[in-house]
Image (cartoon, helix red, strand yellow):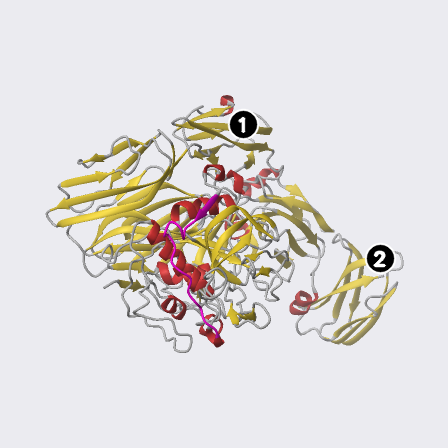
Amino acid sequence: VLHLILFCLVSAIAYPQSGTGPNSDLKSQVLPGDPEYFLGYKPAPFKINYQKRPASDMRYKSAAALPAMLDLRLEERVTGAKNQGEGNYGGNCTAFSSIGSIESRWLSMGFPEVDLSEQNLAACYGFDEENWGYGQGANQFVNSAYLTRLNGPVLEEDDPYNVDIHPCKDDLEPAALIPDSRWLPVRDFELLKHTVYYYGAVYVGIHWDVSGGSFNASDNTYNYAGNNAANHAVLVCGWDDAKTTAGGTGAWIVKNSWGTGWGDNGFFYISYQDSQFAGDEMAYFPVRWENNDVDTIFMHDELGFTGTIPAPNTSQFFELAKFNVLSSHLVTHVGVAVPEPETVLDFNVYDDFDGENLSNLIGSRSGIYVEIPGIYTFALPVKVEDDFYVEVKREVGNNEVNYPVESVDPGFSDPIYNPDANWFKREEAGAWRSTFFEATGGGFNLTVRAYAKKTDGPRALFTANKTQACISSEVVYTYLENNEATSFSWDFGEGSDIATADTKGPHTVKYTTQGTKTVTLIVNGPGGADTTIRHDIVDVGVAIRVNILSSKIAFPFGESAEITAYGADNYAWTPSNILDQSSGQTVIVTPPDIGTYALIVSGTQGLCAGTDTIIVNSTFKPTNDDMCDALLIGPGGTAGIFSTEFASAQEDEPAPDEGQGGGDCLKPMTWCYEDGVQVNNSLWFYFYGPETGLASIRTTGIDGMDNQIAVYRADNCINIIKDSLKAANDDYNETVPEGLSGTIDGLEVIPGEKYYLQIDGSFGGAKGSFELSLYGYFTGEEEIESYGKGDAALNVYPNPGTDVFNIHLKDAGSSDIEILLYNLNGQLIMHKKFQGIRGEILTRLDISNQPGGIYHLRVMDGNRIMDRKLVKR
């Protein structure tokens, strides 16, 4: 019995995305007069970045090494066509394509043919029933959620397909377990061929032309030339480079789910030239576990990956999940969703966490290079007795990590979560932040998982140091220590120079033939025996791709950057004069001057070689990067456009206190921090208090830039300390007017005194450009009305006007009244005094000698101060 351990309470996500309603195109006629054939592909309400490099640059063998024709039917590696049915609940094509892919994969692994249940998959998705219930459409993410939480697949005989009766039977034993899924880069046809050849049939999204004009029933070929997105899912079972269709030469051999009476016994042929073929999704499920391999899955994300949240201006991201176990278990694997290609993962398992620091490391794996998105598991055996913590570090090549989450999305997903079970941070030295935002009640679950078995016997767990290898290069297999093992039996698969071994290892082997390799390990110990067969654990070819995660990097002159390459055994770097070393997988680059440098790495693995290049840009720091280099600005409107892209933080640089975080930083005098880092890439300015005694500061982000701002009172830069903080605001403050990144309005200042202005990227130091403005009066009608609340007795008309403005003050409460008018620069241009008058004042301001523009009017009635904008046309 598999135990699904969910650690959940209630949730509401702070990052909702719009849900997707039922697909109105699920029921459509293929050709006039034919029976109704149903569709059922419906895209998820989010997108992932499938690919960062051209398909031709992916690290797989060339399609030229593959045959001109492959038909899995002839190799008995695909099951026959089934029928998804019709009626109101027949939109289950994605379930049939996913199950068909699994059946084909198992045949390709050497298992006997089995009929798996599409019914159970389609009925037990677990997503919003109204929009994503049985027969209402699905996609690879919805299917992956059911499979990778180990609910199925179950046998067809245990839950037969029935479109009329379809309750979720969630108490059935799976035929085997599917912990992983892979989401191939869309329209990467070379990779698709490679995958079908070695792994079996692949789930693919297409657009089915419901008008019937794209399907040729005489030869069962199909070519759609339009622009409509995918609405149907099918199964690619091979190809024929010589097949002729309306689109041209070459076609994919495809299994449909409309029964054997349709097409070529349920199959048909899609043109290579089809405009929408594989344009939305391609997926397969490469890993099979037997039911007794694990008995417990620890997870918080029952619905799996339902979207991503961006972490800008960082290439690394850290996630932490807490799990509880009531008795001794052997954790065998850890897992996580990977929504971005070319991601490097590190896993650490700890025994203790005090809310700030992790301690007692009990297991780790690092430097796992993942080339394509999907849900992944990795062997990592650790013994756990009570609560334990799994930390994941992910690194990507671009300067923004999109980390996967399970979140509330109305109409799509409504998960529950535990407020004391998930944490995240952006920097290794940063502070952990809970994914539960107490102030707002929002949150999200991380996709970190652990898989365990209650056993005293050894598990045959091992790793290979490569997933792709050059022919005749070395591949190292390492047994992962766990419960006591006394004997070992290895079989390294076809083409290995060392066929078998009977010691623990590590074992170094070389393969003399191409193709994917299957390796078997049998272990025995006092607690029992175990066998693991890792199908297609390494892919051996005649080429490698050496890869640096980033194609370009930029940083200020005087700083250094660490750069790592992947895909080879040996590396040589040039030019060596800007590096700490010229060989090795990781180097540190320190440009000697301002400029652009092309850093080239050459890698070898056996007889194979490859290169990659990264462009390094060493640039100037901003002139006002440091406190003592602050830039003078005046109260006259826009001060200019500035960028924090290459700004830094000084040692012991002051900063406001931390607000409540999580998008709720309404506490006065605070900023929102991430990872406990108060300031990251700040710029400094200074100004003198305008004669108005007011200062208003506004920043407008460019291309989504967010700011946090602070004002300090100090005579010089040496005296800027936290205690001199006069005002602070963050872009998360709900009082910030729409369109602005951060604002401080109506700060009372001492005229002529010096003030320092600090501007940083918001919530973790976002980098980018912004427009800065400084005014000597209140900005925005709401701010003026709020400040002058209770001064309705003051009326200014006409406003806007030309030369003469009427000032009408009712209920004057003091015998001494002052009227002051300031220009845009905060300079006093008119001052009137009235003494010995109570009750009502009516006077006129003549500014015919002043240019058109905005002015600040202040009326002082004893302790009451009233402010108005005055606009001269």
Q: Farthest residue to the top: give it.
A: 577
Tell me the mark number nearer the camera, choosing from 1 and 2.
1
Number of residues whose C-alpha sits closer than 10 Å to that of mark 2, classed few (under 14), some (14–19) or many (20 or more): some
Drawn side of residue 565 relative to residue 871, left or right: left
Q: Earlier in the sequence, mark 1 or mark 2?
A: 1
Note whether 639 is above or below 829 in the view shown: above
- Indicate yes or no whether the magenta region holds residue 72: yes
Q: How many marks?
A: 2
Q: Which residues are magenta?
A: 69-86
- Please state the horizontal and vertical placement of residue 815, each as a whole percent of the image: 74, 71
Local SS, label 1: loop
Residue marked by disc 1:
591
Q: Residue, x 25% and y 31% (percent of image)?
A: 498
Q: Amino acid at mark 1?
A: Pro
- What type of secondary structure mainly makes up the magenta span? loop
Q: State the CA–CA distance, disc 1 to disc 2.
A: 52 Å
- Please state the horizontal and vertical placement of residue 672, each as a whole percent of the image: 50, 55
Say the numbered circle drawn on residue 24: none
Local SS, label 2: loop
- Please state the horizontal and vertical placement of residue 592, each as a whole percent of the image: 55, 25
Residue marked by disc 2:
852
Q: Amino acid at mark 2?
A: Gly
Instruction: Return the residue nearer the eye: 70 or 199.
Output: 70
**Dividing the image into 4 quarters, which one contains the C terminus?**
bottom right
